[in-house]
Image (tube, rainbow, N blue to C red):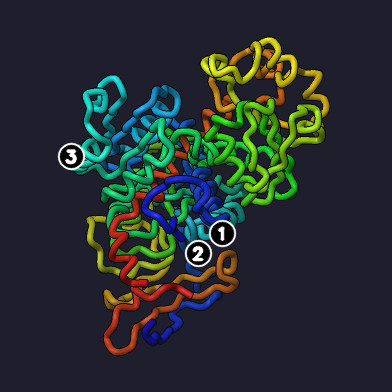
Amino acid sequence: MGKTTRIRVLDAASIDRSLTRIAHEILERNRNLRAIGLVGVQTRGVPLARRLAVRLGAIEGTAPPVGLLDINLYRDDLSRIADHPILRRTEIPFDLDEAVVILVDDVLFTGRTVRAALDALMDLGRPRQIQLAVLVDRGHRELPVRADFVGKNLPTAETERVDVCLTETDGEDEVVIVKAEGGGDAREETRP
Amino acid sequence: MKLSSPHLLGIEPLSPEEITLILDTAEGFSDIAAREIKKVPTLRGKTVVNFFVEPSTRTRSSFELAEKRLSADSLNFSTSTSSLVKGETLLDTLRNLEAMSPDFIVLRHSEAGAPHFLAKHGSTPIVNAGDGAHEHPTQALLDAFTIRRRKERFTGLKVAIVGDILHSRVARSNVYLLTKMGATVVLCGPPTLLPRGLDRLGAGVTHRMEEAIDGADVVMMLRIQHERMLGGFFPTLREYAAFYGLDARRLKRAAKDAIVMHPGPINRGVEIMGDVADGEASVILDQVRSGVAVRMAVLYLLAGGDREAAAQER
């Protein structure tokens, strides 16, 4: 494994502020909170969706339901990776038909995860609308996908990696950029 | 984490971690049957050959459904249509199948070791769907999946397997799996159907059904095949049922929340009485449901592309 350097770009307080702002933006766009359901993409989209639901509940009185979505069966690179990712649960506790779904993920990068998530949602029902909320948009899209709600736009080099750490999954809240030293590709290094 | 072999030939070579990986993965597939669209695009463009050189309806249907739900294309070869009856050797059949470049071959064969032979001489991942009296790994995995869902553990469980142990690949695979995972297994049947040396696999052995069932958490009944009667293994079906049939009275000796399993097809009134098969303790239909999810999990885990490159990296 090569050497890497880590630069923290968001701390706990700024993650918190970003989520609060996204919650307000969601309310501005969607007057009728009752039609809304949040769906977090496994794994780090799930705690983010739960936190957004709490904030929406604090502002409006009732928190929208939160679903979990595993997109691994819909990936387009399954025949290229030897080590298939571990499947996690998909559980949508509300009726997707006619719902307004806010899809929540940690990082928007190539757009391929979002493409897979859209296909997975379509197989589960027919939502009236799907909107996308991400904590970090790091650019380098390979598909025509854009987010409706962005916590932070983060210019990155393609070979860098963006790690979103959350208390629920990693013990603390932070977003770091990982660079490989000597011009290597940090995306090939496994995440600690 | 991934499986260490490109094939699934049996339970014996699997580690407890690999078994847990397959069962955990199957959990992710188990809800697909409840959806409106019972299909995911995971194995789109892959071809699976179901090569069944021994009659089987349920195992083949279960594999076929698993393949279809993963969007793979499947091709069925069975005894009646295969060239084997025309005198082609297994090796020649394998070469012909491989010339059609399948991504998997699912093999059911009456000879033990047939899938190992294909794995050795071919380059296609092989899934053993039952070889002779040797192993039936996906059946043991779906049994384990069903047990784990009800009991949430294997350690400390007592599992009684009753019936024709001699001819049963299901029993053998289950002994391997359950003992690896920390359960205690007791095998039970008439002396003619209980071969010597089974204790070497780590299972207890008894000829008395009461002893096998006493305090058992899981009672697994095996099918008595009528054709075995011709072999003189027991005098009559009625006598067999009297000594080794599972009825409500015998089931009372098992643990209070014991579950009853059977790989099917069941002979009502022979190895299992109708009221037990339809009773609250019976999970026989859960086993069928689990079968599709477990087979999807196996194909998904074996389908990892570029295995050779991954092996070179290590």
Q: Position of residue B271 (x, y in %)?
A: 65, 19
Q: Is residue A64 above or below residue B85?
A: below
Along the line of sight, the residue nearer the viewer: A26 or B54: B54
Chain letter of disc 3? B
Whether labels 3 and 1 share one chain: no
For disc 2, the neighbor class at 10 Å (few under 14, some 14 to 19, many from 20) is many
Dots 3 and 1: beta carbons under 8 Å? no
Q: Is residue B104 visible?
A: yes
What amino acid does circle 3 point to?
Answer: Met
Q: Position of residue B29 (x, y in %)?
A: 47, 41
Determine whether, in the image, residue B132 is placed left or right of residue B90. Answer: right
Q: Quadrant of residue B86?
A: top left
Residue hosting label 1? A51
Dots 1 and 2: beta carbons under 8 Å? yes
Along the line of sight, the residue nearer the viewer: B56 or B302: B56
Determine whether, in the image, residue B305 is placed left or right of residue B201. Answer: left
Which mark is on residue B100? 3
Question: Could you give the CA–CA distance between mark 1 and mark 2, rounded to whole angstroms?
Answer: 8 Å
Question: Could you give the CA–CA distance between mark 3 and mark 1, rounded to whole angstroms?
Answer: 52 Å
Which mark is on residue A19? 2
